[in-house]
Amino acid sequence: MTYVVTDNCIACKYTDCVEVCPVDCFYEGENMLVIHPDECIDCGVCEPECPADAIRPDTEPDMEKWVEFNRKYSALWPVIVTKKDPLPGAEERDGEPGKLEKYFSEAPGTGG
């Protein structure tokens, strides 16, 4: 099992999760985070830290696409280990449907 970040992180990018990760497997895009599925040790400490409930175990239905999504972007984006402020409007966009199509950016974040 591994944990992955799903589309509810897009346009919110809460980073509470990165500070509790014991293996630093979070990677930062311009407007979301991903988890490297091969680096995650399945400890689960990040899941309850996410205010947007965007971190899910890969054992849930239809998570295969998110495992591959997280794998792809974790290879392209910088690692993030320090908490940052969420994106402006994060509270309003939390739970909004269609975020992948509306807001997703392939651009890397700054990491750190």
Image (cartoon, grey):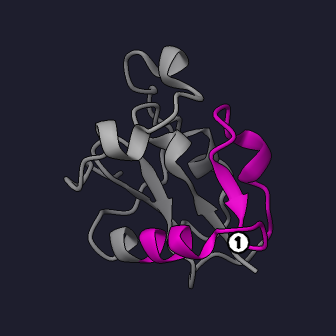
* Residue depicted at 31% across the width and 37% down the height: 103
Q: Nearer the viewer, residue 104 or 62?
A: 62
Image coordinates for residue 109, horizontal then vertical, percent: 27, 49
Q: Nearer the viewer, residue 92 or 83?
A: 92
* Residue depicted at 61% across the width and 71% down the height: 23
> Is residue 24 shown above or below 97?
below
> Is residue 9 shown above or below 26?
above
* Residue depicted at 35% across the width and 51% down the height: 112
Number of dots carrying numbers: 1
Image coordinates for residue 51, horizontal then vertical, percent: 67, 31
* Residue depicted at 35% across the width and 68% down the height: 73
Location of mark 1 (residue): 58
Report if residue 44 lies within the magenta region. Answer: yes
Left or right of 32? Residue 78 is: left
Q: Residue furthest left?
A: 107
* Mark 1 closeness class: few <14, some 14–19, many ≥20 residues within 10 Å: some
Left or right of 93? Residue 63 is: right
Left or right of 37? Residue 13 is: left
Which quadrant of the rendered structure holds the N terminus?
A: bottom right
Q: Residue furthest bottom?
A: 38
Magenta span: 43-71
Image coordinates for residue 59, horizontal then vertical, percent: 78, 73
> Is residue 102 shown above or below 85?
below
Circle 1 SS class: loop
Image coordinates for residue 76, horizontal then vertical, percent: 26, 71
Q: Label 1 sits on what residue type?
A: Asp
Report if residue 11 lies within the magenta region. Answer: no
